[in-house]
Image (spheres, rainbow, N blue to C red):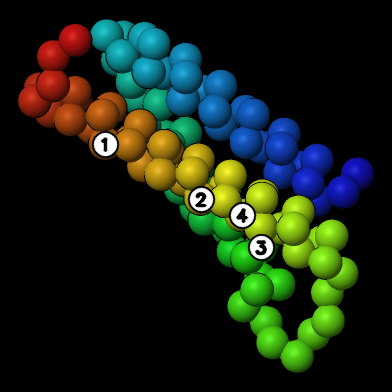
């Protein structure tokens, strides 16, 4: 397995938990699950973004152009999912405080 496959599996699990949690925010157990998966997802998506952005940060190392394109695509996807993950956590937290109604 390559790193891409492992990251894809992690992203799929976290996205599934967030989607289930968002669809069932009335249930306190799912709301807690959504907040916990979003909290851990923040760190995981951030580290995935850094991993794929690393070839653009490091200087003096020659990377294959194909690898750079793939890294850019995965970095943008990870950054987008990071933003969605932060929004999911914010919605679950605001609902828990009673500021948002469904």
Residue picked out by circle 4? 75
Which residue has dot 1 on it? 90
Residue 76 lies, in percent from the top left, at: 57, 51
**Which circle's residue, 3 or 2, is located before the other in the chain?**
3
Residues at marks 1 and 4 touching, judged by CB atoms closer than 8 Å: no
Q: Dot 4: few (<14), some (14–19), or many (≥20) neighbours within 10 Å?
A: many
Mark 4 near mark 2, Cβ–Cβ under 8 Å? yes
- Give the distance between the C-alpha atoms of the residues marked 3 and 1, in whole angstroms: 25 Å
Of badges 1 and 4, the one in the foreground is 4
Query: What SS does tag 3 mark?
Result: helix
For residue 61, what is the image quadrant? bottom right
Residue 8, quarter of picture? top right
Task: Mark 1 or mark 4: name the one nearer the start of the chain.
Answer: 4
Residue at 71% x, 72% y is: 55
Task: Work out which residue is located at the far right of the displayed protein and give it.
Answer: 1
Q: Which mark is residue 51?
A: 3
Is residue 62 something that shows in the picture?
A: yes
Q: Is residue 30 above or below residue 12?
A: above
Q: Which of disc 1 and disc 3 is earlier in sequence?
A: 3
**Image mark for residue 78:** none
- In the rendering, which numbered label is found on residue 79? 2
Q: Quadrant of residue 53?
A: bottom right
């Amino acid at each position: 397995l390559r790193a891409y496959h492992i990251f894809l599996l992690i992203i799929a699990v976290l996205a599934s938990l967030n989607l289930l949690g968002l669809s069932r925010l009335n249930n306190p157990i799912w709301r807690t699950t959504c907040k916990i998966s979003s909290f851990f997802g923040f760190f995981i998506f951030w580290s995935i973004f850094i991993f794929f952005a690393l070839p653009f940060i490091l200087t003096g190392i020659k990377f294959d152009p194909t690898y750079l394109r793939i890294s850019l695509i995965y970095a943008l996807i990870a950054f987008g999912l990071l933003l969605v993950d932060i929004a999911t956590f914010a919605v679950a937290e605001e609902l828990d405080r009673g500021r948002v109604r469904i």
